[in-house]
Amino acid sequence: MIRKIIIPLFIGSIFFISCGNNTNKQDKPVAKDSAAIAVSPELQNLNKLIAATPNNPDLYQTRAKYYLGTKMFDEGLADMTRALTLDSTKVDYYITLSDLYFAANKSGNAKTALEKAIKLDNKNVEAYLRLAELYLYVQKNDKSIGYINEALKIDKYNAKAYFMKGMNFKDLKDTAKAISSMQTAVEQDQTYYNAYIQLGILCAAQKNKLAVDYYKDAIKLAPKSNEAWYNLGKYYQDMQDNNNAIATYLTLLKMQNNKNAFYNLGVIYLVDLKDYNKAVAYFTGAIDLDKQYTEAYYGRGVSYEKLKDTKKALADFTSCLTINPAFGPAKAEIQKLNSGK
């Protein structure tokens, strides 16, 4: 899990928050309504196969995985219960069961299922890594690393194991070991996108220019990655390399809208380049994508203030307070403008 980093920029009396690294998290898929699920050709086919061979446990597992993908966890759990009733000896069934429990926020049940999997097969790397992931999720890093080490005893070249070890060290704020583990992950698998992203984030936090190389490695694997292009632009911005930051954000915006890229371009043009008209345009782009973007209204308000357009500046500062009545910088600007200072 990659956490979003918020980095403040203090320039004189102006307060800005430049939006930090995008996370590996993507928006969770919206569960399909039951009507849409019922007419799905894939589900219809699975239902027919199960009706024809009701004692085939593999079919119940296949349908359970389908339900997992559509967030119908109760249905998936019912199918895995049926599969295990028919055959309780398959390790893979317990792993699928654990995935469903974990997705349904039943981590205790997920742990029990994985422990049963390991009891059946104590050489199952995937079961150890699933347990490691579970303990990483609840921030019990020592236990997580212990299960990762068990997996590596079985498969010392497992890239996922090194990646997860890196995530644990990142949680423990041991950056050197985190970087080392992530580097080992990409040595084992040169197509490991998430490991390159993490290496970029870890190096960027150290202001290490290797971050650029790692983000570019990620972009080679996913040329239209919002995350990789944005993080690269943010690194350049943090290093005050405005030319590369602007070029990178604009490349991203040609592919897809990103409110934080618009906002950060606004910050660059307002704070560093003093081009207030362009700043207004980019802050407006951010607001068009998110009408509740308090910082973008504030940035545009300051830009209007620099352009001597007090009316529009006050309107934007007022919008800030409508969205967030506790937003102190907007209150201060309104008081200043109303006092005529």
Image: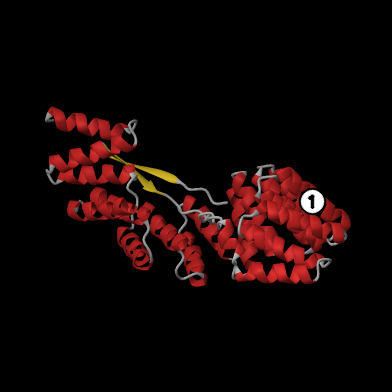
Q: Say if residue 304 shows up in the picture.
A: yes
The one of 40 and 68 positioned closer to us in this rendering: 40
Residue 34, image x, y percentages: 59, 57
Q: Quadrant of the C terminus?
A: top left
Q: Whole-percent x and y of residue 150?
A: 79, 55
Q: Is residue 147 left or right of residue 205?
A: right
- Name the residue at 14% across, 40% down: 311
Identify residue for label 1.
113
The front one of 76 and 243 is 76
- The amino acid on which the numbered mark 1 sits, given as a three-letter code, is Ala
Disc 1 element: helix
Picture layout, residue 122 above or below residue 143: below
Of residues 317 and 215, which is closer to you in this image?
317
Q: How is the image coloured?
A: secondary structure
Residue that appears at 52% across and 48% down: 3
| Point 44% across, 68% down: residue | 224
The image quarter containing residue 299 is top left
Residue appearing at x 48%, y 50% in the figure: 205
Q: In the picture shown, does residue 187 fall above or below 312?
A: below
246 on left or right of 20: left
Q: In which image quadrant can residue 72 be found?
A: bottom right
User: Crowding near pointer 1: few (<14 within 10 Å), some, many (20+)?
Assistant: many
Q: In the picture, residue 75 is in which quadrant?
A: bottom right
On the image, the x and y values in percent for residue 176 come to 60, 51
Q: Does the image show residue 157?
A: no
Total residue callouts: 1
285 relative to 304, above or below: below
Looking at the image, residue 245 sits to the left or right of residue 333; the answer is right
